Image (cartoon, helix red, strand yellow):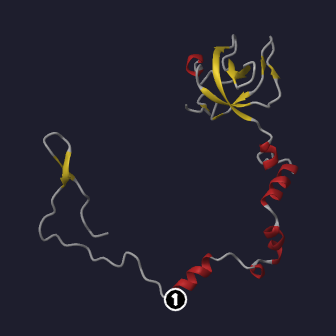
Amino acid sequence: QLGLPPVEHALGKDGWPTGPTPMVAGHALAPSGALFPTFDEDGTKAILAKLAPPKEGDAPAGDAKAATKAPADDAKAAAAAGDASVITYDDFAKVDLRVGLVKTCEKVPKKDKLLKLTVDVGEPEPRQIIAGLALSFTPETLVGRRVVVVANLAPRDFGKGMVSHGMLLATGPSEALHLATVEG
């Protein structure tokens, strides 16, 4: 803004910067204007009018119904219309997320993507959870980690006595998952 060259730090003998490179005497500075312009009363009113919420009479007749509709109504309407990507707050409030400690973890034989975990979520018995994390994590890296568990998911039978009693919260493609964990 002042027309100065980029600041380059002079290096000392130890390689650490000693300070900015000195400017040559007589270097001309660029002309500068006001950093913070002053507003007259008309300019202030124009800005406030632009930022003010629209008045009831300003909306077109077709938008009057949309303006009075609550966001929750939009979500319910989208969910009722079969839009699977939209859920209501009430639906989300049903999800029971808990932090659990991974006690054991092993690969499921003959299944490339599956790991069988034992997770302590503070109940009398730890839960067995079957998770498709094997492409992103080795069993050793998960033991001892605190993970986020969807605890009220219906049990899912994977066959051969393997029933999953929850789901670990993760995001991303199956070969590069990011697991929701809690430090501490």
Q: How busy is the neighbourhood of tag 1: few (under 14 within 10 Å), some, or many (20 plus)?
A: few
* Image coordinates for residue 42, horizontal then vertical, percent: 53, 89
Quarter occupied by residue 2: bottom left
Residue 91 visible in the displayed image: yes
Residue 115 visible in the displayed image: no
Residue at the farthest right position: 80
* Image coordinates for residue 124, horizontal then vertical, percent: 75, 20
Vertical placement of residue 25 versus 44, above or below: above
The residue lying at 64 percent from left, 24 percent from top is 101
Report the residue marked by disc 1.
41
The foreground one among 134 and 180 is 180
**Quadrant occupied by the N terminus:** bottom left
The residue lying at 11 percent from left, 68 percent from top is 25
* Image coordinates for residue 152, horizontal then vertical, percent: 79, 31
The image shows a total of numbered marks equal to 1
* Image coordinates for residue 7, horizontal then vertical, percent: 24, 57
The residue lying at 59 percent from left, 33 percent from top is 182
Tell me: 22 left or right of 134. left
Amino acid type, label 1 = Glu
**Quadrant occupied by the C terminus:** top right
Quarter occupied by residue 148: top right
The residue lying at 64 percent from left, 77 percent from top is 52
Vertical placement of residue 130 versus 168, above or below: above
The foreground one among 154 and 58 is 154
Tell me: 140 left or right of 25. right
The kind of secondary structure element at disc 1 is helix
Vertical placement of residue 138 versus 76, above or below: above
